[in-house]
Amino acid sequence: MQFLFPGVLWGLLALSIPLIVHLFNFRRTKKIFFSNVSLLKAVDTQTSSFRKLKRWLIMAARMLFLACLVLAFAQPIWFKGAEIKAQSSGINGIYIDNSLSMENVTEGKHFFDLAIIKVDELLSIFNRSSNVQLTTNDFDGQDQFVQGANKIKDRLTTLKYSEAPRTLEQVYKRQKTVANKHNPSGANHFFWFSDFQKSTAGKLSNIKVDSLDQVHIIPVLGKVSQNVFVDSVWLSVPVVREMQNNVLNVKVFNSGNTTVEKLPLKLILDGVQASTSSVNISPNAFASATFNFTVKDRGTHKAKIEFDDQPITFDNDYFFVLNASPTIRVLHLYGNKSKQDYIGKMYANDSLFNYTSASLSNVDPGVIQNADLVILEGANSIDGGVKEKLEAFIADGGSLGIIPGENISVSSYATFLGKYGIQSFSDISDVPTAQTLSELAEPEKSNIFFEGVFERAASNMAVSLPKSSPKVVWSGIANKLLVYKNGKNFLTQTKVGDGNIYLLSSPLSSAYGNFQEHAYFVPTFYKMAYLSAKPERLSYRFNDQVLKFFMPDAPKNATYKLKNGNFEMIPVQRLYGKTLELTLPKSAEVNHDPAYTSGFYTLEINGQAKKVIALNHDQNESRLDVYTSDELKDIFENNPNVIVHDDVTDGSFVQAFRDTTLGTPLWKYFILLALVFLLMEILLARFMKS
């Protein structure tokens, strides 16, 4: 037992007053003369002993009354178990996890609401204290100071969910910084109310608690959890075409511990429902769905996957952007092109492509850098300024298709291709004849290059395969797209950085075969063009931090802004080559603006809208795998300065904390005892008679 005001105990000296009164009877004696006192001796002996007993009892009651009264004013506190005293020199720091995962529900209440209710009860213990401090995931500036409990209660009514997750190590450092400003040598109590997600709590072993501090961990847990979120979306083909059927693939994840059956998913395009699907998802498992959709116009289309999954709803919408029929810039460089101009006829007649052609004899090498795909046809050699520009083009992520001429310089080709892993390059000098034509093998359907290309022809495999006579042969590590039946290369794909080098073994001449007139020709060269388009991600997440865009026309020293409605920000920007790199601020660094949330953002350059991007929540916040009380106790079992409570829903938590940490105040009981002894004194004096 301890006393809040031990100085009052000096009042116990007042107990000497009734003792002195008892020991020294100050009542004056009165003499009465009797003629014969023999008859009074027996009566006097009996009443004298009774009177002494009465006086002793009254003295005891009076002294106990005074003792209880003094002890009550000294405010005694009784501790159960470990005696841990809340010291007024430190602070009482309270952390409420207001991250989005606290939307979860147990016993009909959101985790966040349960935490606030228990914090309000906890504040009743500190109702007279002025050293209380509140911390949330926002790390708000107004929470950097200690305040009275009543002000903290008012602050609770304004709390909202935060987009910014925090590790517990960050929380402790934040609270410790505030405590050091208040009193560097003070002992502090820190209270953490959280669901303790494993994906966002950080590495708990890194938390080093000061020996003067006491950390109280109060988990907010539920028996049943369910949350479905979109893991990723992707297209079956690289490019969305207008007025054609397109296929979108969606992968969703169930991070709960219950099975989700027939969850309806909706595809929303430009605010209109375009397609639906449904999925069954086992606990902690993935499921996939496909959507068929059509867009009417070229350009940017805002899209989202939408579903209703309770009780956590912040991740029920997944935003992404579809760029329908983006212009692919194809440059056709030729030395001797085919008489029928197969390349020009294919690319020039499709609005998807911005096609230009130029002869190697009078081309400006600078135009190469502005293309997505360069088709080099019939070049006798690869050297000079064209070679340098092609090397720079490939280094920047461009794609190059090479169709050899009939009279080539093997050394120039070998020198150019050798640095990209294409080895043993040589030509075949024999004049092609009908006997030298060899049939190509059927393409490997498992090759990702041909995914979806020949699906319509799969049912009619009786179509004859193209024939060709090779002009050049080579080896090396490459993706063999088409080969002869003897296994030799006809068309290979060599990955170089973000681009590709496609090498064909024969010219587009009837003397060397009929590939250019076969059904394989158009889809193969279309796919080469599709893959040359600089891939743009459909969506981003806030934790990606760095966003990269291919923007060949982006000006230097310009102002780049991201806008979402009335919200706008200027991210850190860097332009190198044709790539624009933007560094996003963390959610907590944007002045806690509620507009900085998942959705569509417009990229403006010098005030002009150039691109629309989609930003979504961090996946980690959607994963509901949490630390249980037992796991937390195991982690902190060797740390005596950390106390792990069972659960915030335990109704006796606050009382247990009061008893074990702040103790049970006993002054009320001593007041009652004082009144009892006062009443006893009155009764003894009034009714205890001989």
Image (cartoon, rainbow, N blue to C red):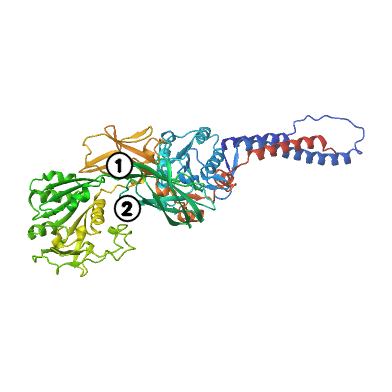
Q: Residues within 10 Å of mark 1 (few under 14, many from 20)?
A: some
Say which residue appears at 21% left-offset and 58% top-offset: 517
Q: Is residue 146 above or below residue 543?
A: above
- Mark 1 touching mark 2, by CB under 8 A? no
- Name the front one of labels 1 and 2: 2
Q: Which residue is mark 2?
A: 237
Residue under circle 1?
A: 583
Q: Is residue 208 visible?
A: no
Disc 2 residue crowd, few under 14, some 14–19, many 20+, Cα 10 Å: some
**Front-lying residue, 70 or 485:** 485
Identity of the amino acid at label 1? Thr
Q: Residue 512: x percent and y percent?
A: 14, 62
- Figure check: 90 above or below 510: above
Closer to the camera in the image, 52 or 490? 490
| Element type at mark 1 | strand
| 363 horizontally vs 142: left or right | left
Q: Which part of the image, by quadrant, shows the N terminus?
A: top right
Q: Residue at x 53, y 53 (%)?
A: 224
Task: Find residue 561 and report its image quarter.
Answer: top left
Q: Position of residue 254 (x, y in %)?
A: 46, 54
